[in-house]
Amino acid sequence: MKFFDLTLLRKYITLSVVMTGVLCGVLLVLRSLEIITFVLLPFFIAFGVFFVLSVFLFWHSISRPLFLILRQMEALLSGRPYKKIYTDRVDEVGVLAHFFNEVTKHLSSFTGEIQQGERMKEELSTAAAIQRSILPSTTPVLPGLLVSANTRPAAEVGGDSFDFVTTGDRTIFYVGDVTGHGVPAGLIMTMVNMLVYTYGEIYPNIYDLMVSLNRQLKRRIQNARYMTMVMMQWNHVEKKLSYVGAGHEHILVFRSKTGMVEVIKTGGIALGMVPDASKLIQEIPLSLEENDMVLLYTDGITEARNMTGGMFGLERLQESFLRYAAQYNPDGVSQHIVDDLQHFAEGCLPGDDITLIVLKRAEK
């Protein structure tokens, strides 16, 4: 029925008109029957005045305030500008106005958070793009050594770092892992990258480079943050490899003659933990024969977990390395290890950044 589609004011007026019509009909019937007297006339006049006043009061106290609230609600729902409703009423109309004000207040706050989140997302994307541009897009071609690198950040901005710096007849390369991930870790990673490039031109060996790198990081980062690293140097002329450890993961070496994987502790102390690491680190030679392979990695691989909470672990990494080292070149070994890791952790998001560097001693 159309009656039930009307506004409250129209419903009230319609009902009042119907009631007035009924009373007028009764009045006409009584008059035709000559029953009406002048005694009843004041009653009908009073009713008419009451009707007019009640319509006005209903419109002023209920219908008009509700109309104003509904107009703001329609503006909100249609995406148009809306205004706060000011009222000191404590009845149902006041409750509706207060409810609308509270909803729109939190909605404005939520909208601001969304906008701020969008800005932060855009800034993170920019930071991630800058970080990707810093990391090497290709691996170097080195005399007597094949190289492959693979990295996958857990967040938009990661804390894992690696690079290759060639100066003269030597190439320096490293794998590093800043505590945590995200923007703070990414900033430290970027700082380290720039320092390695600078110091690589200054110092003749990676021991002095690492001592200076640690000193600069200790001065510039908070005590709660540090960076583990293993740095290697390949001499193009002598075809010799050496390394310096800074509290990083193990070095895995596949020996082609024995078909075994050797596990070497990198030693040292993480960068940024002590002011002077000169007595805590050392440069150590690592002999390689033809077809031997070296695997460097970050703990995002060994500490990756599956749905049951189990970790991939060093033993599984050794098994994967041993399985593929005799069959594939460094690119193939790196890709197959990553595939094994993804199969193990299927259904679980990575909890940390993942970085691999695989080296193979080529012909002498």
Image (cartoon, helix red, strand yellow):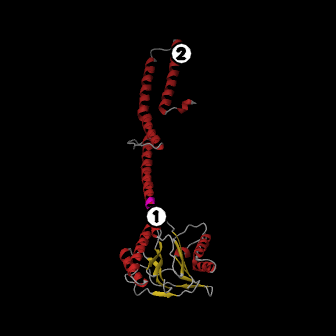
Q: Residues within 10 Å of mark 1 (few under 14, many from 20)?
A: few
Reply above or below: 323 against 92: below
Query: Which residue carries the number 2 mark?
Result: 29
Residue 153 on the magenta segment: no
Reply above or below: 303 against 98: below
Most foreground residue, 328 or 195: 328
Q: Quadrant of the C terminus?
A: bottom right
Q: Residues within 10 Å of mark 2 (few under 14, many from 20)?
A: few
* The disc label shown at residue 129, or none: 1
Image coords of residue 110 (percent x, y):
44, 53
Most foreground residue, 151 or 343: 151
Three-letter code, disc 2:
Val
**Residue depicted at x 44% and y 34%:** 63
Image coords of residue 240 (percent x, y):
50, 86
The secondary structure type at the circle numbered 2 is helix
Q: Identify the magenta region.
A: 121-127
* The disc label shown at residue 43, or none: none
The secondary structure type at the circle numbered 1 is helix
Most foreground residue, 175 or 221: 175
Q: Is residue 208 left or right of residue 292?
A: left
Image coords of residue 224 (percent x, y):
41, 74
Mark 1 and mark 2 residues within 8 Å of each other at the beta carbon: no
